[in-house]
Image (cartoon, grey):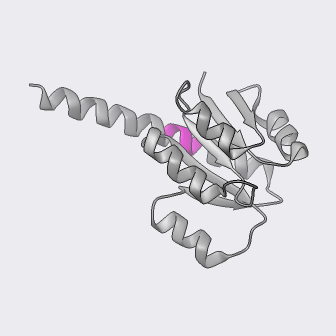
Amino acid sequence: MQKVLIVDDESPVLRAFNRLFAKEYALTLVNDPLKAVESFADNHYDLILSDIKMPNMDGFELLQAFAAHYPDSGRMLVSGYTDLDECQGAVEKGIADIIVSKPWDNFELTSIVKLLLENGKLKSEIAHLKAQLETK
């Protein structure tokens, strides 16, 4: 089962994500981005889904830390935050794969999560094949 880390400082949002994804994925739900970063050392995640505006660390910083640990894993921001230039810059710089606005459409969100997880799996397979070719 693929592992998804969801980080949001609002408990109702975490509960909504849990209802939406718990049947298909192994979820880790965290309300503090600093605790999410601590979990990187002991876990492997296939995808992170994070809010942008949170205390202690924003979603952009969190996704940058996540990318350093899991470069092939999907990175998604879900937020009501509306600085379009900053959001577009995060995607262009490769910090986030996609940003979805709150409130989200459940079908759209679940479809994007599936695509990001499949993309991460393909990236990992390509990296594995490249490593095999380099050792020959």
Q: Is residue 30 left or right of residue 98?
A: right
Q: Looking at the picture, how far across and down is residue 102, in whole percent?
A: 80, 60
Could you say which quadrant of the image residue 124 lies in? top left
Task: Tell me which residue sits at (42%, 43%) in the image.
Answer: 71
| In the image, farthest residue toward the left | 136
| In the image, farthest residue toward the top | 1
Vertical side of 98 occupied by 39: above or below: above
Q: Is residue 70 visible?
A: no
How many marks the image carries: the answer is 0
Task: Tell me which residue sits at (61%, 69%) in the image.
Answer: 87
Q: Looking at the picture, how far across and down is residue 65, in whole percent?
A: 52, 48
Q: Looking at the picture, how far across and down is residue 125, in whole percent?
A: 35, 32
Q: Is residue 126 left or right of residue 17?
A: left
For the C terminus, which image quadrant? Answer: top left
| In the image, farthest residue toward the right | 12
Q: Is residue 34 left or right of residue 106?
A: left
- Range covered by the magenta-colored residues: 114-118
Q: Is residue 56 visible?
A: yes
Could you say which quadrant of the image residue 20 lies in? top right
Q: Is residue 126 left or right of residue 42?
A: left
Most frequent secondary structure within the magenta stretch: helix
117 within the magenta span? yes
For the N terminus, which image quadrant? Answer: top right
Task: Tell me which residue sits at (52%, 71%) in the image.
Answer: 89
Q: Looking at the picture, how far across and down is residue 54, in whole percent?
A: 75, 56
Vertical side of 108 occupied by 71: above or below: above
Task: Tell me which residue sits at (78%, 42%) in the image.
Answer: 31
124 within the magenta span? no
Q: Nearer the viewer, residue 32 or 6?
A: 32
